[in-house]
């Protein structure tokens, strides 16, 4: 692979947003290079089964990502198995420095680095992620019909997850570190009025236990008394926020207070433009609301079309 030649388009990230963008860009003859990042495939690689991807009644996350990668390769997309260490946006072409100290030049860039779930950092979490532990009730709630599930968190995301899970089970427990919920009033009311949702306040999860294949129980610790107790659980939904993968973009393009990319709805440059002309964003790296693989893929399409328009019209 020639790294000194300026690429028309470099896509940073290889989840649904980045791979969808790559297919559209490749078919437009932009010959994109995709930089995989530290977790090729993104959050989907940690999802065991998916039942809400249109056209697939049931498919595993790794299989779906594998299909996307093959699709991209079919149209001639190149992949680079590295991460981005730095990006220089002051001059054009843009210069990307990789973790392997490669210098890549690009006329345009699509940032599709996604976001990662904010984790608890407790024993057992790493071992059982995807084996009963999830960050998305919409994605995985249907797999816990009539099971005992626990939601960690007290904000809107936690309340949304708890409410959604009530469609499948009446055995729901919310664990929150504070003595009251922090979600919006309307979201709190929805949960507090639901007789099937129990709330444990002033508590955290100290450890996650399982049988090797899936989680079986949690060790819950009261923050005021330090008392610990075991709580049976078939599923655990961690809802304490996401962390956008934008550390390398600080002071390069405009980010909001939570680190998400700010999008500028430009009449000519489309709806995925960032504060730097020629750089576009797609997926969870700016979408903090929907957080679905299919919406990320749709945004990848949008970003590729915007980049094509930018390049072809010298915008």
Image (cartoon, rainbow, N blue to C red):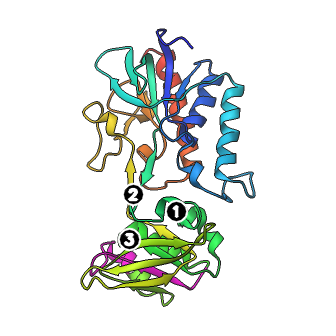
Q: Is residue 283 above or below residue 312?
A: below
The answer for how far apart the CA atoms under marks 3 and 2 are is 11 Å
What element does badge 3 sit on? loop
The answer for how far apart the CA atoms under marks 3 and 1 are is 13 Å
What element does badge 2 sit on? loop
The residue sitting at 54% across, 63% down in the picture is: 128
Q: Quadrant of the C terminus?
A: top left
Residue matched to label 3: 153
Looking at the rendering, the stretch of residues picked out in magenta corresponds to 169-188
Tell whether position 172 is magenta. yes
Q: Position of residue 185 (x, y in %)?
A: 32, 76
Residue 136: mark: 1
**In the rendered image, which quarter is residue 92 located in?**
top left
The residue sitting at 45% across, 39% down in the picture is: 113
Along the polypeptide, which appears first: circle 3 or circle 1?
1
Residue matched to label 2: 118
Determine crowd level at label 3: few under 14, some 14-19, many 20+ residues with C-alpha closer than 10 A: many
Magenta part, dominant SS: loop
Q: Position of residue 68 (x, y in %)?
A: 66, 38
Determine crowd level at label 2: few under 14, some 14-19, many 20+ residues with C-alpha closer than 10 A: some
């Amino acid at each position: 692979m020639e790294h000194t030649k300026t690429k028309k388009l470099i896509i940073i990230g290889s989840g649904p947003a980045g791979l969808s963008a790559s297919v559209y860009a490749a078919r437009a003859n932009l010959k994109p290079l995709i930089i995989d990042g530290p977790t090729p495939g993104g959050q989907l690689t940690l999802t065991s089964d998916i039942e809400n991807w249109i056209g697939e009644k049931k498919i595993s996350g790794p299989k779906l990502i594998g299909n996307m990668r093959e699709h991209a390769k079919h149209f001639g997309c190149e992949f680079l198995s590295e991460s981005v260490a730095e990006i220089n946006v002051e001059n054009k072409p843009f210069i990307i420095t990789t973790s392997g100290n490669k210098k890549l030049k690009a006329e345009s860039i699509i940032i599709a680095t996604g976001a990662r779930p904010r984790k608890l950092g407790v024993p057992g979490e790493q071992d059982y992620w995807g084996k009963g532990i999830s960050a998305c009730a919409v994605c995985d709630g249907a797999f816990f019909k009539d099971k005992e599930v626990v939601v960690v968190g007290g904000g809107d995301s936690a309340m949304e997850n708890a409410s959604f899970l009530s469609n499948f089970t009446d055995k729901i427990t919310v664990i929150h570190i504070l003595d009251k919920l922090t979600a919006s009033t309307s979201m709190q009311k929805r949960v507090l009025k639901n007789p099937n949702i129990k709330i444990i306040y002033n508590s955290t999860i100290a450890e996650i236990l399982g049988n090797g294949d899936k989680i079986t129980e949690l060790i819950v610790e009261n923050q005021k008394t330090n008392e610990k107790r075991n709580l049976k659980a078939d599923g655990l939904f961690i809802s304490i926020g996401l962390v956008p993968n934008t550390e390398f973009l600080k002071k390069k393009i405009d980010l909001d207070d939570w680190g998400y990319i700010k999008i500028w709805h430009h009449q000519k440059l489309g709806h995925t433009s960032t504060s730097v002309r020629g750089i576009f964003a797609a997926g969870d790296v700016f979408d903090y609301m929907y957080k679905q693989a299919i919406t990320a893929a749709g945004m990848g399409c949008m970003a590729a079309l915007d980049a094509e328009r930018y390049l072809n019209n010298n915008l």
